[in-house]
Amino acid sequence: MIIRRISHFYIDGFRSMRVGRKLWLIIFIKLFIMFGVLKIYFFPNYLNTNFSSDQARAEHVLDNITVYSK
Amino acid sequence: MIEHVDLSQVNWARAQFALTAMYHWIFVPLTLGLSVLLAFFHSIYVKTGNEEWKRLTKFWMTLFAINFAIGIATGIILEFQFGTNWSNYSWMVGDIFGAPLAAEGIFAFFLEATFFAVMFFGWNRVSKGFHLFSTWMVAIGSNLSALWILVANGWMQYPIGMQFNPDSARFEMQNFWEILFSPVAISKFTHATSSSFQMASLFVVGISSWYLLKGRHQLMAKRSIVVASVLGILASGYVAFTGDEAAYSVANKQPMKLAAMEGLYDGEKGASIAAMGIVNNAKEPGDKQDAFLFDVKIPGLLSLLANREFGSFVPGINDLVFGNKEQGIVGADERIAKGKMAIEHLTVYKEAQKHGYAVQAEQALNEFNKYKDDIGYGYLNKPADIVPPVATTFYAFHIMVILGTIFPLVFLLFLIFIKKGTLHSHRWLLNLGLACLPLGYIATEAGWVVAEVGRQPWAIQGLLPVSVANTNLTTGTVQTSFFMFFALFTVLLIAEIKIMLTQIKNGPEEN
């Protein structure tokens, strides 16, 4: 009963939106560009992509911050 | 040393981060401030039962929704950049940032997200009391979200409550409460939120002024102006107070930033504050040139601001770069030498650990611990590398302060003329109110320029310069994503302005 009332609350709310529909469309397009395109093709996590374990990542960073002593 | 790093790539990565952060901050302060104003408007409606206040609340709620929808997730791109462009940094701070960002997710985001729908869909569907409660929860949740991000930023400006682990290459959290209640984090949070209240008040006053200039929705506009101006004046007072606290904290924790904010090269007792000035761009630390081509100074005020004492000594850029024995200030050259020792011993420790030389590793670690507080300096080439861009920091600080001083006067004038009942006849003031809308954005962005440009070259103050924090990518890769973001954000901004202008032109009836 409560779940039905809550779901009706949201369904009625979304149905009565006017400006909101346009905003939801913008949100979905934006999230798709961000997570579906930019994140996957342009912003891979460098350490997660190139190293398989935390130990390897730590060693890589440690190498990077100590290379300056040479 | 630092010349090994491709500086053009670092600078493109910095520009990309700055671009994203500045676009993100177009949306955030309005969300923080307008959510509080909505709560006040809604409270007045519930208290009076007057339908005009309901209409007014719903109108500003629509503009809030537009800003929220366009701005949502723009901050996530900063996190993308951490993983790609700033991998050394993101690895090293992961343990510190994990806790505040998780806290944001649990306490703030869910609070905000749960009550958001009730705030928008709740009219005539839930009780008035619960509906109002939800609007307040959205305001509190939005501002709590900002707390955790600003705690993380405050830690970068003043890294405390942690220990560097030489095995994992991570700064590990030792004391969560010390990080949460760091004076820098607290002053950042209070200053950022109060200035956001001020900015949102300017937004409401600006749009209401436009309605009065056009002779439309006059009752709604005047009521909005009254509430926004009262909040604006209160917020302005708090902005001044928290700004003073922030400056005091900068003077103690980041004296170089304060020196750059004021273009102060030679420290002095009873230091003057520059009310305005034109910076001499040819000036270098240690030379004999004047710091300003033109300036107007107020004697003693900088000492009061920095140390709460008129005659006290405020160090200048030269004191911090070259040292000042009389004042007990260690020069950057000495700190660079210590930093290089730290890096050298860390290297020995790493190699000894790799080969299983336990005694040698322990000795190297003991030596490293003696110098580790200055490790960041070891990556610099020369003492003058610790100086941030002085002109940018100086101008941004003064633009912020001058505008922040004008805004409360504007709010006050609006209240005076509304009380007299003559506001509509003072078109100059209505035009000024409208002009203050973009100026509010400029002031709040300038504040972040001071905070971030003024702390260069550091990603983490004194411990990690930006040139070591970044990933060694090609310049072309970063340039490509820079222009993609520039295009995406510009489209989003145009969309926001277009949708918002349409709603404003339509007015409350059409919402």
Image (cartoon, coloured by chain):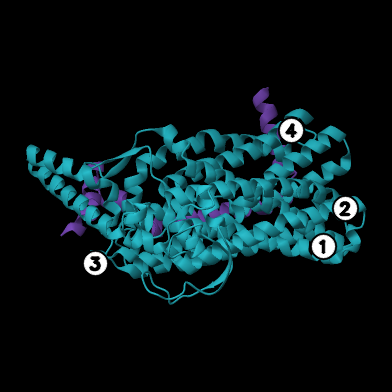
Chain colours: A purple, B cyan
The three-letter code of the residue at mark 1 reads Leu
Q: Quadrant of the N terminus of chain B?
A: bottom left
Q: CA distance from mark 4 to mark 2?
A: 30 Å
Question: Does residue B41 appear left or right of residue B452 in this picture?
Answer: right
Q: Which circle, 3 or 2, is nearer the viewer?
A: 2
Q: CA distance from mark 1 to mark 2?
A: 11 Å
Q: Position of residue B83 (x, y in %)?
A: 37, 52
The reply to whether the C-beta atoms of the residues labelled 4 and 2 are less than 8 Å apart is: no
Q: Name the foreground residue: B277 vs A57.
A: B277
Q: Which residue is mark 2?
A: B418
Q: Which residue is mark 3?
A: B4
Q: Which residue is mark 1?
A: B430
Question: Does residue B224 appear left or right of residue B305 in this picture?
Answer: right
Please state the chain letter of the residue tagged with numbered disc 4 in the rendered image. Answer: B
Q: Name the foreground residue: A37 vs B272.
A: B272
- The residue that appears at 65% across and 53% down in the rendered structure is B67
Residue B131's disc is 4
Q: Position of residue B253 (x, y in %)?
A: 43, 48
Q: Name the foreground residue: B85 vs A66.
A: A66
The three-letter code of the residue at mark 2 reads Ile
Q: Which circle, 3 or 4, is nearer the viewer?
A: 3
